[in-house]
């Protein structure tokens, strides 16, 4: 069964019915091309944002590690950093357009989800602030990224933490090994 399309352009040219109007086919082709470009650009933008996120984490790690040294307490620097983070996040939520979750949505969130991410975050950041002054920001970040990447590859492979499963491939293993070799080369004195 062939679909029949009508097009104003073809209609005015006295073509009343065409199996797949060339005008529509061209428009669909152009639309698909633009969609692919938009997806590609969107993916590039996401990669750029991820890269900037890494840059921001390195900067905040260095600044807050220095704060910990000046305060003589990485734990106090962590508390201050999180206090400022909470304040800034609340300001962003206040000005964000959109809706807050419903009471039903909040009730359906498992209890452990309210604190577990925060505990891991505080411990991770505290370790950053403790080790940066002792190792240097480059060494600490390189080993920190190594830990993140290895866990991400393993967790993705097994679907841990309710993440989408991403099978471990030879290419990923080579990438992780290459990164580890790079970290060793970066840190050889």
Image (spheres, rainbow, N blue to C red):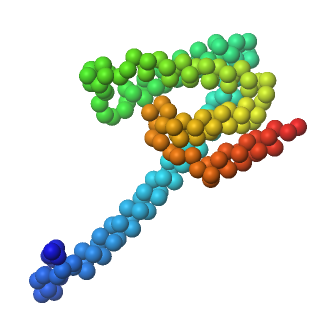
- Looking at the rendered image, the quarter that the C terminus falls into is top right
Q: Residue at left 44%, top 33%?
A: 162
- Looking at the rendered image, the quarter that the N terminus falls into is bottom left
> Is residue 137 at least partly visible in the picture?
no
In the displayed structure, would residue 188 be above or below residue 178? above
Q: Residue at left 43%, top 29%?
A: 92
Q: Residue at left 64%, top 12%?
A: 76
Report the front residue among 180 and 119.
180
In the displayed structure, would residue 83 be above or below residue 30? above
- Left or right, 170 with reference to 7: right
Q: How far across and how far down the image is residue 73, in percent? A: 70, 12
In the displayed structure, would residue 26 be above or below residue 77? below
Q: How far across and how far down the image is residue 125, in percent? A: 62, 23
Q: Residue furthest right?
A: 189
Q: Quadrant of residue 145?
A: top right
Q: How far across and how far down the image is residue 171, in percent? A: 62, 53
Q: Residue at left 12%, top 87%?
A: 14
Report the front residue among 39 and 176.
176
In the displayed structure, would residue 75 be above or below residue 30? above
- Left or right, 59 with reference to 20: right
> Is residue 151 at least partly visible in the picture?
yes
């Amino acid at each position: 069964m062939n679909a029949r399309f009508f097009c104003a352009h073809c209609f005015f040219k006295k073509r009343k019915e065409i199996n797949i109007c060339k005008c529509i086919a061209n428009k669909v082709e152009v639309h698909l091309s633009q969609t692919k470009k938009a997806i590609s650009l969107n993916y590039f933008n996401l990669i750029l944002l991820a890269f900037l996120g890494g840059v921001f984490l390195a900067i905040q790690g260095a600044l807050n590690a220095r704060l910990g040294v000046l305060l003589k307490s990485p734990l106090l620097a962590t508390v201050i950093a999180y206090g400022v983070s909470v304040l800034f996040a609340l300001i962003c939520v206040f000005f964000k357009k959109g809706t807050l979750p419903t009471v039903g949505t909040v009730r359906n969130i498992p209890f452990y989800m309210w604190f577990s991410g925060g505990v891991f975050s505080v411990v991770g950041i505290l370790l950053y602030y403790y080790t940066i002054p002792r190792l240097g920001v480059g060494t600490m970040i390189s080993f920190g990224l190594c830990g993140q990447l290895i866990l991400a590859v393993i967790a993705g492979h097994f679907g841990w933490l309710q993440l989408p499963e991403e099978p471990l491939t030879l290419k990923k293993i080579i990438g992780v090994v290459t990164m580890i070799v790079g970290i060793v080369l970066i840190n050889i004195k």
